[in-house]
Image (tube, rainbow, N blue to C red):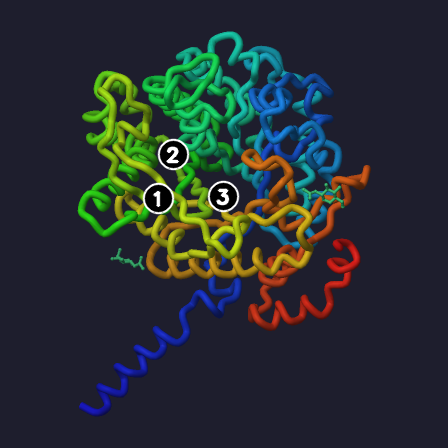
Amino acid sequence: MLRLLFLQIFVLNLLVAVPSSLEFSRDDFPPDFIFGSGTSAYQVSGGSSKREDGRTPSIWDTYADAGKAHGATGDVACDGYHKYREDVQLMVDIGLDAYRFSISWSRLIPNGRGPINPRGLQYYNNLINELVSHGIQPHVTLHNYDHPQALEDEYGGWVSRKIVRDFPEYAGVCFREFGDRVSFWTTINEPNAFMLGGYDLGFLPPQRCSPPYGYCSRGNSPSEPYIAAHNILLAHASAARLYKKKYQDKQHGMIGLSIYMWWFIPLTDTKEDAIATQRANAFHYGWFLNPLVFGDYPNIMKQSVGTRMPAFTNQESKLVKGSFDFIGVLHCTNIYVKHNSNSPKMENRDVFMDAEIELTVIEDSSSAFELPIMPWCLQAVLEYLKQDYGNPPIYIYENGQRMQRNSTLNDIARVNFMHAYIGGVLDALRNGSNTRGYFVWAFLDLFELLDGYISSYGINYVDLDDPDLKRYPKFSAKWYSKFLKGRSINLDEAIELEKNTSSLSHSHFQ
Ligand SMILES: *[C@@H]1O[C@H](CO)[C@@H](O)[C@H](O)[C@H]1NC(C)=O
Ligand SMILES: *[C@@H]1O[C@H](CO)[C@@H](O)[C@H](O)[C@H]1NC(C)=O
């Protein structure tokens, strides 16, 4: 009896005193677990990329050129277009397994369909060869909010069924030209956030919306987000089918789609808010995940949206269902859900009204800039995908800490964030999550889609005042490097060491 009691206490102590999330090393992860970092085309490639070498504008060029992105543009950004060799060397120095980037559709196929731009093709071949020859695995996204302006002008981009033919054709060019060296394809990045920003509220390109949800020159908030999402699902599934039929046997890669995932938390402990949180999940994640996993939209959505919700034919349902090898997860923070029943009549609701929810971000008052560190929210997201969607293979493609640009090279807040979230991922793995990789956002201080150059998430600083745009590894890059090179990490020691040795951070700032 005594012995039993002792054992129980011992086990409990172990669980309480040494949570895996505090003390861990890379060896605690499965040997084939991938660690990387990422960027996207418009955010990093630069002005040289814009019309130089045959590229045409994407919807992001149009939007930023009109001064709508805090007056900033990606015209220069980090000039990744010319500096890719240097950047790959930096990845090697840090010890990244993988690099996630996106292809600019309008660089590769300037008119959106038809002739390939040979210089665009050459650039992506150069970048991919540089990565592969240095042992860095490319993870490629085909669409990151940036379809060609030519297709927006011609037929309204994603609101037209025509794109369901053009997107897979573009994807097919990428599989054919790059698939011998690229094994990880994401068709569309976070379409759920794209729909809300670009088609419902309309504050992001292509700025389609209608009052009272937003004030745009064209669009229809009650219907277009659903139509565009339907076309995205069909275009994704057609591209995936092409890959699986024609390339996968030879190229042995995987294809998937990425979703932006907050963790939704009921604002109050009322039953209404608990049920509203389930609706939030259905309207934000189920919208895409249910068709991909089960072949149809969630029932709650179909009931609430009614005839504005496009329906899948049997054939389409079969095409979409199971059309993925992995799900990409982008996660930074949590958000609170409140039940809202003040909905207008059914035909004039937008997505939030259909869901009868209001979302609230509760700012951590200690810093308006930095995100709260809540790794359990990411764990909850992974647990939700495990329980509700059959535990698919997952790549965490974006997770990172926002800080004021220029604030410091000594970004301890970012190290704290990464340390906590990587530990959280380890806990989720130990509880059965099928997560296969973690990519910190972002590799460089780049053009942020919501903030321009005001904030940054980079583990490497880019000096925008230097004509050469020199890169400086921050403390977070050095910390990540130590972790990736297998050294055991004690966070407090690392921070002490950095405080005493980081001379660059003092001479370079303030
Ligand atoms: C761990 O997994 C089990 C079984 O799926 C689940 O019931 C439990 O809630 C999970 N724990 C956490 C912390 O996610
Ligand atoms: C960053 O610092 C440079 C000077 O080093 C300055 O020109 C630039 O405006 C700063 N940017 C921000 C967003 O503070």
Residue sitting at 22 percent across and 20 percent down? 345
Query: Looking at the image, which residue is at 73% across and 20% down?
Result: 53
Give the secondary structure at mark 3: strand
Residue 392: numbered disc: 1
Gap between marks 2 and 3 measured at Cα: 16 Å
Q: Does the CB distance between marks 1 and 2 fall below 8 Å?
A: yes
Please determine whether, in this image, residue 458 is positioned above or below residue 42: below
Percent of width and height locating residue 228:
39, 20
Decide which of 475, 63 is in the foreground and name it: 63
Query: Which of marks 3 and 2 precedes in the sequence?
Result: 2
Residue tagged 2: 324
Q: How many tags in the picture?
A: 3
Q: Is residue 54 left or right of residue 30?
A: right
Q: Amino acid at mark 2?
A: Phe
Pointer 3 residue: 397
Mark 2 or 3: the one toward you = 3
Q: Give the secondary structure at mark 1.
A: loop
Residue under the point 63% across and 57% down: 411
